[in-house]
Image: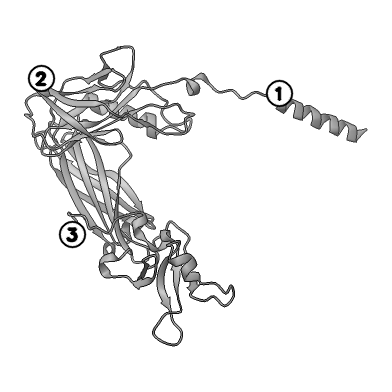
Amino acid sequence: MNSRRIILSVLLVLLAVSCKKPYTPPQITTVTNYLVVEGQINTGGDSTVIKLSRTVNISSAVASSPELNAQVAIQDDQNKSYTLQAIGIGVYATGALNLDPTHKYRLNINTSDGKNYVSDFVAAKASPPIDSVGFTVQSNGIQLYVNTHDPNNNTHYYRWDFVETWLFDAYYESIYYSTGDTILPRLPQNQIYQCWTNDLSDDIILGSSAKLTKDVIYQGVLTQVPSYSEKIEDKYSILVKQYALTSDAYNYFTLLKKNTEQLGSIFDAQPSQLTGNVHCTSDPTIPAIGYIAAGSVALKRIFIQRDQLPAGWRTSYPYSCQLDSFLYYNPKTKMNDVQLFLLPKIYVPVSGIFSIGPAPIGYTGSSYECGDCTIRGTTVKPSFWQ
């Protein structure tokens, strides 16, 4: 009797589970295709870079959709126009324009679907110089910070982004290479052991001195680098860009930061309506996302050497690496491993294996992820590198 009850109970549970239908909220499945505009009109001696994309559904497999084939231009309040060129997937740019800071500026965008978008005219706001960029050593890595001030007490609202560049090593140093027909010693100019790579900041970094008696930002946090990161394995550099904001722009970026970076638990800020200064003139009912400010940008670069950091820190390589032996004649398989694996560049040769005589009987080798730094970087030294 008891066994019958158990079987009946299991069948009822299975039936109940099988009758459940998945529910997808309409907010997830609603099709949205709003234009997203990112960037700032640079009125000084640096480039203006604008990124255009489209919103996608939460359930979509992609995070964003770049806006291609748009026509983008900067306009001033004197009817002058400056065209931006497409330089990448959804990225439009122009070189330094050195615009008149006494005028107001806006962005004009014509998309490939025939819609026109404009931002509000805004006054140019020059950033004060960056006083310094520094770092503090913590138990689990370094924390980078920025110091700045406005002696005229006119800025109060700041935004920063940055570009990181670092020198790193492959796990193994390959001293041989394959021509496809033979294995030869690698020349210094063809080394693939040390490379440079870079990364852009992806957080919204803001600071305000509006509640202070002086317009000063002291040790505003930029980013943190873990002690095990490849970024500080050899040498690291960070280029910080500082933007001066109006109170409206600051409020927009503050809300954007809350909506994109500070959600995830019941204790975080709840999503809020995001209203920028970009509008669709073709159809005012179509929302657009973005806030376009204008002004000159302050820049500051620093370098951090490995010997400035604790000697006990060890780098964690992003791949699991091991050396294998590839022989011209493998006594176990009776095969030519070099011909099978190294000549066709399936693996990268690392060092020679020698027995009697000067000619190698084979080579050690590893995956390209572990023996070739150009998989993730470049051997071309950046022009600014010191």
Residue 49 appears at what percent x and percent y?
A: 21, 35
The quarter of the picture where the C terminus appears is bottom left
Residue extending farthest front = 181
- Counting other residues with Cα less than 10 Å from the Cα at mark 1, is it few (<14), some (14-19), or many (20 or more)? few
Q: Do the residues labelled 1 and 2 touch (CB within 8 Å)?
A: no
Distance from disc 1 to disc 2, alpha carbons, whole Å, reads 63 Å
In this view, the residue in front, 154 or 80, is 80
At label 3, the amino acid type is Gln
In this view, the residue in front, 174 or 204, is 174
Residue 205 located left or right of residue 62: left
Q: Mark 1 points at which residue?
A: 19
Residue 249 located left or right of residue 260: left
Distance from disc 3 to disc 2, alpha carbons, whole Å, reads 42 Å
Q: Mark 2 points at which residue?
A: 77
Nearest to N terminus: mark 1 or mark 2: 1
At label 1, the amino acid type is Cys
Task: State the count of labels.
Answer: 3
- Residue at image point 25% right, 40% down: 161
Residue extending farthest right = 1
Image position of 286 with respect to 55: above or below:
above
Q: Mark 3 points at which residue?
A: 386
Determine if residue 174 is in view.
no
- Residue at image point 32% right, 70% down: 186
The image quarter containing residue 315 is bottom left
Residue 87 appears at what percent x and percent y?
A: 24, 37
- Counting other residues with Cα less than 10 Å from the Cα at mark 2, is it few (<14), some (14-19), or many (20 or more)? few
Distance from disc 3 to disc 1, alpha carbons, whole Å, reads 67 Å
Residue 101 appears at what percent x and percent y?
A: 8, 29
In this view, the residue in front, 274 or 344, is 344
Determine if residue 53 is in view.
yes
User: Could you say whether the residue bearing mark 2 is in a helix, strand or loop?
Assistant: loop
At label 2, the amino acid type is Asp
